[in-house]
């Protein structure tokens, strides 16, 4: 018994306690828990099927863009501007792919940290950039598909502008704090 209590961690009980609370609350309120669960599952499957085409389009587009060398070409094209702004060249592909793909950005982030020191300028800028920006197109496609509304040009512009501010500020903040 002592060895079990020595490894006891309250966080291991959080999820079972939440589930038990929901079941008890449903029983007290006399809710048919199984029917409610099934209705919720069916509704979520329908939403998943409605969102799937948008996600598939986004994933195929990102794969084609990456495989075709589009990231490298765009990186070379905007490198004069990014170097003028003091943005590390290693982080430019991350800034390009971040609004498009979280997993793609994570892969590039991993390569930045493995090729450069995590405590170096590029590693710190990449870390701040990952924490201060969003996978804009993925988020917009999922949310708008779920709501069955088309995103306006204005909202896409504002979201991309916020990402641009995040890119610039990530470099600026790291420069101010660490240099």
Image (cartoon, rainbow, N blue to C red):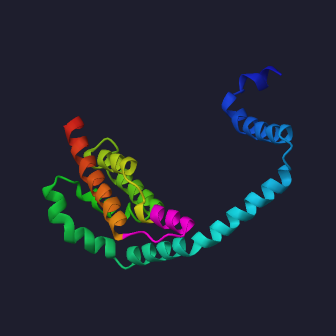
Residue farthest top in this picture: 2
In depth, the one of 152 and 57 nearer the eye is 152
Residue displayed at 20% across by 71% down? 77
Q: Main secondary structure of the magenta part?
A: helix
User: Is residue 148 rendered magenta in the image?
Assistant: yes
Q: Quadrant of residue 98?
A: bottom left
Q: Is residue 79 above or below residue 16?
A: below
Residue 97: horizontal and vertical position, in percent?
A: 37, 64
Task: For the N terminus, give its image quadrant.
Answer: top right
Closer-to-camera residue (37/135)? 37
Residue under the point 42% across and 59% down: 135
Extreme-front residue of the structure? 29
Name the residue: 85% across, 53% down.
Answer: 34
Residue name at image x 37 percent, y 50 percent: 113
Instruction: Report the span colored magenta.
Output: 138-152
> As rendered, which of 148 and 10 lies closer to the eye?
148
**Residue 33: x %, y % from top left:** 83, 49
Depth check, front residue: 26 or 70: 26
Q: Quadrant of the C terminus?
A: top left
The quadrant holding residue 151 is: bottom left
On screen, residue 174 versus residue 36, left or right, reads left
The answer to whether residue 173 is left or right of residue 80 is: right
Image position of 111 with respect to 53: above or below: above
Query: x, y (%) of residue 173?
Result: 24, 42
Give the mark count: 0
Measured as percent of width and height from the top left, residue 41 is found at 74, 60
Q: Is residue 52 rendered magenta in the image? A: no
């Amino acid at each position: 018994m002592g060895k079990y209590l020595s490894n006891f961690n309250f966080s291991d009980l959080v999820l079972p306690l939440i589930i038990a609370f929901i079941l008890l609350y449903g029983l007290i309120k006399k809710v048919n828990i199984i029917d409610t669960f099934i209705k919720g599952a069916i509704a979520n499957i329908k939403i998943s099927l409605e969102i799937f085409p948008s996600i598939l389009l986004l994933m195929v587009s990102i794969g084609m863009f990456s495989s075709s060398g589009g990231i490298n070409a765009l990186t070379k094209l905007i490198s004069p501007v990014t170097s003028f702004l003091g943005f590390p060249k290693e982080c430019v592909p991350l800034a390009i792919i971040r609004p498009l793909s979280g997993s793609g950005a994570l892969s590039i982030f991993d390569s930045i940290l493995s090729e450069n020191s995590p405590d170096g300028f590029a590693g710190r800028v990449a870390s701040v950039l990952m924490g201060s920006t969003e996978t804009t197109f993925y988020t917009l496609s999922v949310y708008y598909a779920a709501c069955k509304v088309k995103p306006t040009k204005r909202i896409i512009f504002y979201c991309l502008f916020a990402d641009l501010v995040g890119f610039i500020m990530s470099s600026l903040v790291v420069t101010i704090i660490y240099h």
